[in-house]
Image (cartoon, rainbow, N blue to C red):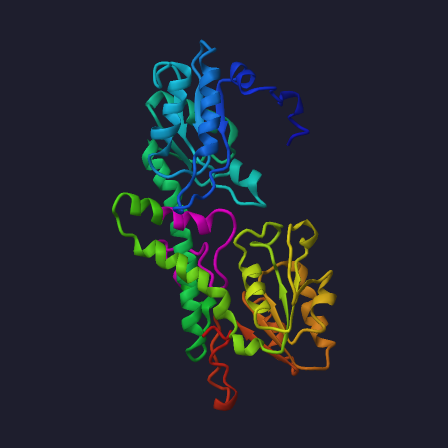
Amino acid sequence: MIQANKERINVAESIADAVARTDVTFVVVPTPSDVTGGFSVQYAEEAFRDLGAALAKKNDYHLVVMTSTVLPGATRAHLLRALEDQSGLRCGPDFGLCYSPEFIALGSVIRDFLNPDFLLIGEFDERSGSILESFYKTVTSNGAPAARMSIENAELAKVSLNAYVTMKITFANMLAKLCERIPNGDVDAVTGALGLDKRIGRHYLVGGLGFGGPCFPRDNVALAAFADSIGVDVPLARATHDANLRIPQELVSASALERRKVAVLGISYKVGSHVIEESQGLAIARYCAHHANEVALFDPLMREMQLVVERPSRVAVSLEDAVPDADIVIVANRDPFFNGLPSILAALSRPVTVIDVWRTFRSDLNQCAHVTYRATGVGYATTTSPATRNVRAASRS
């Protein structure tokens, strides 16, 4: 895309230069979590002060769009004030302001930006919102509807959307726990049925590991912090966050790890990404390292990861390096790179336990004589004798 549009792309030497030559400015700066769990607008305020100084030198109407995630009230109370103080202008007649966050995922940023489910536009006034909606319509590919509202409502909509998705993930993980304890339990059958109801839908309703990455975990915490600041109790957001933190240690008991060698496959927080921020796979590896003799970590993108491990952990260079010495193999994500695992295990002549979080290898490993196969979210078969029933399929408790 850069190559196709290189004649239309310019790099400005300063914010003032950029504002002078354009009609719309999008501010996409970090809003890291602060000590309360909310979002800091320190970097955003710095950017908006510079933008305000640039607007003071411009005669034409200019639209400023805040894109980074913030909590309700931040844009109007902090960022708008910085623009007006530095420019000497008034929002509305002199310049426009919107809050319009992106709904994109790492690994599919371009596709998600061009094909959004909807356009979320928090507008200072109708003029600001109309200009931004018109711009989006010329850029996006799928004719997505625009949800236009006040800036504060849009700020809340952004953070609450992520909180709702994480709640849905956690609900599916709860169902997985239940299915492990009942005869013939199968979380995929249960969530597949629930997903057919149009009120629920299938997306994110898959029992397995919890959520990770740079956005989902912190958004629940931030929503709870914001609720505290205005005197509202939100136990659902807190429960979702707490349940997510417990998953790594519930996956396999400490006693099962003693004097064992463990291989954890899948260290990034999602398939196809080298990002390890709030990664459940990494949390599992760290938990195992406290109880096992050795933990081998492997991910196809390991070389791109900024990862430092301490003994007894080691970074494996390949699937073949990670698996053969392991007593327990934990498959933490569904990367196609791991499809060679069954053949590697078949060549072993000693017992090995496989904990398959996403049930990827049910048909491949369930009948392998020397492999004890445990799938998260799958209960015991009623045809199995009581002595060999795997009631706790993934050793969660």
Question: Vertically, is 248 above or below 389?
Answer: above
Residue 376 in view: no
Residue 151 drawn at (x, y percent): 34, 32
Whether the magenta-drawn stretch holds residue 199 is answered as: yes
251 relative position to 344: left or right: left
Residue 2 drawn at (x, y percent): 65, 30
321 relative position to 376: left or right: right
Q: Farthest residue in the left direction? A: 231
Q: Quadrant of residue 168?
A: bottom left
Q: Residue at x 73, y 62 (%)?
A: 318
Residue 382 drawn at (x, y percent): 46, 84
Q: Nearer the viewer, residue 366 or 66?
A: 66
Residue 98 drawn at (x, y percent): 40, 27
**Residues in magenta, as a range:** 194-223
Q: Main SS type for the magenta part?
A: loop
Q: Looking at the figure, which quarter contains the N terminus?
A: top right
Whether the magenta-drawn stretch holds residue 174 is answered as: no
Q: Residue at x 63, y 76 (%)?
A: 260
Q: Looking at the figure, which quarter contains the C terminus?
A: bottom left
Q: Farthest residue in the top direction? A: 59
Q: Nearer the viewer, residue 197 or 51?
A: 51
90 relative position to 5: left or right: left
Question: Vertically, is 219 above or below 196?
Answer: above
